[in-house]
Image (cartoon, grey):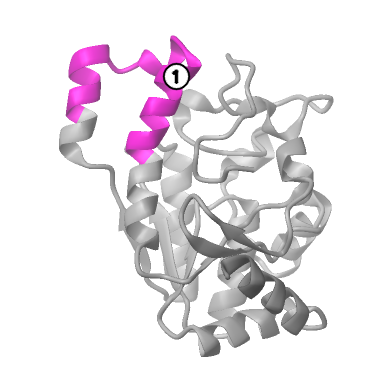
Amino acid sequence: MSTEIAQALLDKTKNFSIEETLTYLADQYQNKVVFSTSFGQEDQVITALIAKNNVPITIFTLDTGRLFQQTYDVFHKTLKKYKINIKTYFPETIAVEELLNHKGPNSFYESVENRKECCFIRKVVPLTKALKGNEIWITGLRAEQSENRNDLAAFEYDAHFNIIKFNPLLKWTLAEVQKYIDDNNVPQNALHKQGFVSIGCAPCTRAITADEDIRAGRWWWESSHKECGLHQK
């Protein structure tokens, strides 16, 4: 049934602008539409579209406890510019304490399994809490971000979280994202000008060179699909 709902939404909104689709979702799924932001370029575009059009969609973020100061800076600037509320979810204190007590603060460097454990505690569990009771989850995913995301649809059913996911910028290029930011004076993480394209936790993110994949800076010490568990693709 949920895959049918995703297809129906695709059909209904195929000729809608992003703004029209956001408004339609807010009307149809009142108080059950959420947007998750990590304050990256794509997320900042969506935040601007929601705020500028006064669409009643809840915006939330996950504070893992290990973010860059530059991320907090753009978080603060966004609040001030758009006069909006952004709900913050933290990992469970006991789970983080137990992880550090048993494995230390840098266990995620030791294996993919350890890294995914840290991501699960700091990101997946809080996200599960944030999504509970909602029906539409808006994301800033783009197809060109990784091979794993090439086959995504604008609307799709996420079986892991049992929710319909809407990816409004799916077909946008990074250049189009940057142009919107520049044209609309959207607050941007200062790290983007320093070679950071995809920004996550500070210990797990580095700048990339021009010839590297967009996701190469995430969990740069390992060979994997470069995902943390929030998005299965």
Specify whether residue 186 is in view: no
The correct choice, above or below, for 14 with respect to 129 in the image is: below
Seen as rendered, the residue at the extreme top is 110
Decide whether the magenta segment is chiefly helix, strand or loop.
helix
Which of the two residues, 153 or 106, is positioned nearer the viewer here?
153
Residue at the location (34% across, 45% down)? 125
Relative side of 213 to 230, left or right: right
Which of the two residues, 145 or 137, is positioned nearer the viewer here?
137
Relative side of 226 to 93, left or right: right
The magenta stretch is: 97-122
Residue at the location (73% across, 34% down)? 214
Residue at the location (67% across, 81% down)? 21
Which of the two residues, 149 or 90, is positioned nearer the viewer here?
149
Specify whether residue 163 is in view: yes
Say which quarter of the image contains residue 14: bottom right
Seen as rendered, the residue at the extreme bottom is 27
Which of the two residues, 43 or 226, is positioned nearer the viewer here?
226
The x, y position of residue 153, in whole percent, is 74, 59
Question: To which residue does mark 1 refer?
Answer: 113
